[in-house]
Amino acid sequence: MTEQQPIAVLGGGSFGTALANLLAENGQRVLHWMRDPEQVEAILATRENPRYLKGVKVHPAVEPLTDLPATLQACQLVFVALPSSALRQALQPVAGLLEGKLLISTTKGIEAQSFKLMSQILEEIAPQARIGVLSGPNLAREVAEHALTATVIASEDEELCQRVQAALHGRTFRVYASGDRFGVELGGALKNVYAIMAGMAAALGMGENTKSMLITRALAEMTRFAVHLGANPMTFLGLAGVGDLIVTCSSPKSRNYQVGFALGEGLSLDDAVARLGEVAEGVNTIKVLKAKAEQLQVYMPLVAGLHAILFEGRTLNQVIEALMRAEPKTDVDFIPTTGF
């Protein structure tokens, strides 16, 4: 099904560009809003987004532009692919135009002061909008290059899920639906933190067993935290949980993994982020997450350990040693170890 009116994609980064292309390939007209007029000029001139997805052609049905009110007035279905730090300031001034729209957040981050997820910020700015979350193991460049990919659209609003599935589902991109918006979104935000650790482990030449241990304990930890906040533990067995965690923790294409790798090579945090040249959401998330875990008294040793590495001058070896000395807990929190 092709939407009768154009579809908006907000944000000119790598994922926003890949998403705009996917929609256009499915026969949709796409209005691709970005903040930087020079970027719009570059795409119009070369049909490429040189800063974020070098070498990937932008589809002719994608129209890059900088007029946000006009973009929103023309579209009912709006994908929001802005960095977590920019989302509120970009959309607050146009809040009145968001009423009744279908707003789909694709940003895997948490707002620093409020511990709000992106869809919760959208709800706050536009209480009359219908809101969903798109998340999963979706590296932007692979999506843009048509590697077979699956994602999850999560919302309590079934019609919204169906509209997004119809617009995005294509030859190389499968879209599954979920009713657990909170769990899906939390999975996407939390895994970025552990990807930094996985990148460090790779740079330091740690064994496959070690990497597997880190990923599995990360899954246990993020599930424990999310369930404490009301998410469904089963969500974390799906694409937005374990699926996203695996790709982000094992792929050199993942931005958070790249930051971790640079740290493992001995770069400072500032230099590692500068080398990347893009936003790695995990760096912002780690501070917020550690404070929240302490406040809620949720046991998150990997988060505490990573925080110690990034901001307290510890090494990964010291942190892993401390983890190995800790009292082993149960393997899976939701399976009783005594009786039935």
Image: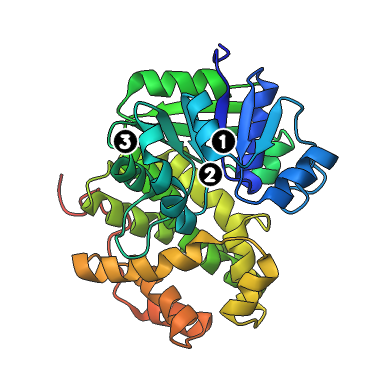
Contact check, label 2 and label 3, Cβ < 8 Å: no
Q: Residue at x 65, y 47 (%)?
A: 14
**Mark 1 vs 3, N-terminal side:** 1
Q: Residue at (57%, 78%) from the top-left corner?
A: 269
Marker disc for residue 81: 2
The residue beneath circle 3 is 180
Q: In this view, does 210 lie to the left or right of 300?
A: right
> Hey, which quadrant is residue 24 in on the image?
top right
Amino acid type shown at disc 3? Asp
130 over 238 or under it: above or below: above
Q: Can you see residue 204?
A: no
Question: Could you tell me the amino acid type at mark 2?
Answer: Ala
Instruction: Compare marks 2 and 3 and give the one earlier in the sequence.
Output: 2
Which class describes the residues within 10 Å of circle 2: few (<14), some (14-19), or many (20+)?
many
The foreground one among 274 and 292 is 274
Q: Is label 1 in a helix, a strand or a loop? A: strand
Residue at the disc numbered 1 = 9
